[in-house]
Image: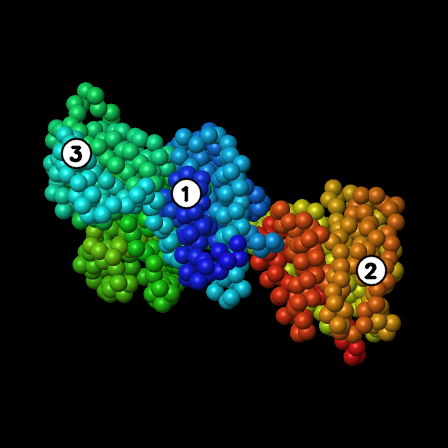
Amino acid sequence: MADAAAEDRRAGSGPELLEPVLVDLARRTGASVAAVYLLEEDEPVLRLAALGGAPWEISMPWARVMLDAVSPVSDAVRERRLVWVGGQEERARRYPRLALVLPYRFALAAAAVATGADTWGGLVVHWPASHPSELSPREREAITGACHRLGLILRHAAEEGRRVRPGAEPLMLPPLRARTVGPDEAQAAVDFVERLPRGCCSLGVDGRIAFVSTRAAELLGADIDALLGRKPWEALPWLDEPTAEDRYRAAVLSREPVSFTALRPPDRWLSFRLTPDASGISVHIAPTHSAHAHAPVSAPPRPDAGVSTAPGRAATLYHLMHLAATLTEAVGVRDVVDQVADQMLPAFGAEALALMTAEEGRLRIIGYRGYSADVMEGFDAEPLTSATPAVRTLATGVAAFFGSFAELQRAYPPAVAQDGMAAWAFLPLITSGHPVGSLVLAYGRPRAFASEERAVLTSTAGLIAQALDRARLYDAKHQLAHDLQAALLPHALPDVPGLEVAARYLPATRGMDVGGDFYDLIRLDATNAAAAIGDVQGHNMTAAALMGQVRTAVHATAGAPPDEVLARTNRLLTDLDPGLFTSCLYAHIDLTEQRARLATAGHPPPLLRHPDGRTEVLHLPPGLLLGIDPDVPYSSTEVPLPPGSVLAFYTDGLVEAPGVDLEDAVDALARQLERAGPGTLDALADSLVQHARRSAPRSDDIALLLIRPTGRP
């Protein structure tokens, strides 16, 4: 295994390192699609890094997945388990948004890519509709082995200082082919196809026409050169309707033959049969009669259709359906901006966008994509009295479309070409009848905005406005909740001569939720101090308020023996009967005696690093959580605390992760503390936090308190 990983490392330093594993997995299991997502280092987001078996256009809406989203890959990574979805009904029940956007017959599995305590991302595998409803043991073993090998490759790359990161687009894996042939056999195959009475063409994995027979070109009414290298619905306007591309997507994902009929204007009906495999899709084309036709997939070309590079209608509907579904789950303005950018640009063929809201008499840019920061800085904070398209759209609530810079300058003579674009759509964001902002879509080439496209853009902007209005309210409540939590935590720890301290608090929840984690350092006198850390059950306002009461109770009794401090605090909480339980760890530090006395109420064990670097887990006598039994006793334990030693208190968010044994995680944290070596406590605190972030996705808040006697007053 190590030799294989070494070979993979020598192949490159990006997602191409992962290619051999994915190709081998597809061959061994008969999977139709294989993809790897990588976890971002600084935010809880999974990004698509490598993809095989499906076009990038189909996977684009899923290129970026929040770790706490409800999806197979995020569930698998977050919970470190294998997720199996055997069919359409199960997918609709467990993942309705996925089923709504991809209503096709296929099975899928997702699993976490991890090594030990380190989580790197997730693996997603699809099978054709013919796959049994359960995974076989051999397939499970292959997935587990692939995840292990991927994890080793990613870990070794990170250890060598060249962590694998996704590109702007995923690495597209080469298609699996049954065999390859030389030029003589290829010509013989063409001769064979040309003799068939039906028309034939071949689509590559990306949906583009790779081969078309003479008979097929005749039936389609187009030259072969005009068809090659293009998608059918792009080359043939009469196929630019949802049904044709929808049937193509069904063939790609289900790997089942599908058929449809279409009317080639003015009156010629054609039948299409799509036969897919790993290398692409074979298409058989034949004349048919309207009496046997399904609902036509086309209408005559629209009279207002002009120069446009827009995606096909099915692609637009696909992205907009995904956008509408994801906006219902967006919890903050940042979520809305990301989802709009992810879906709007590919849906309408735009190259850039900017999202703006009115604040304090100015139009503020709250998000953008495709533009540079310098360009956006020039447009940010425009006064609402300015005569610009974005301001006018906000003021009037009427969309404005400019197919060229000349059109824009005729409407706004002072306009200057600054963003390098050639066409623009300025859309009002209206909610409850009131404009709240503007959305600008920009295009790199001149464009004729058809009336149908204008209507879709305007109505889409209305959906975005409603989501943005909810998100701004959510963010305001979120900020209020965290301001409350911040007010209850110590703004600064007291200066205790002879004691060096460092603390960290990192909220891990999204939205309005706040946690009940707390820490404190209390100066008792010139040579004594007390330290406490705790975690109130739950993530809400009640937990935050109870956290403040626990801190107050500990302060009020600090100086008494640790077991007595916990006993008194426990009696107070049981009298309050808040319905929530609290863990707490309390220490009395005597700098003169160079000792610490500790007591715990169901809290994770502290760590003690000795001056020589040796680190141990302090297994204190267990104590019952606070707030359960008013008469429960607590015990104190005394440990030496000489100068240079480090006492580490933490909450379970630093060590708990799905699928990881708690004792193993605590031992791993102790090893990290031991390896960190000498240095400032701030650097040591950052090292422990980074270890936790690297080891596994976190779903709980993190509080950390480090204490080191210096031996100097």
* Furthest residue in direction bottom, as rendered: 712
Residue in the image at 73% along x and 44% along y:
580
* Furthest residue in direction top, as rendered: 291
Mark 2 or 1 closer to N-term? Answer: 1
The quadrant holding residue 324 is top left
Callout 2 amino acid: Leu
Residue in the image at 36% along x and 50% along y:
173
Where is residue 100? Give x, y as percent. 41, 35
Q: Which mark is residue 199?
A: 3
Give the Cα separation between the discs numbered 2 and 1: 58 Å
Q: Which residue is mark 2?
A: 598
Where is residue 61? Give x, y as percent. 39, 46
Where is residue 64? Give x, y as percent. 44, 50
Residue in the image at 62% along x and 46% along y:
659
Mark 3 or 1 closer to N-term? Answer: 1
Callout 3 amino acid: Gly
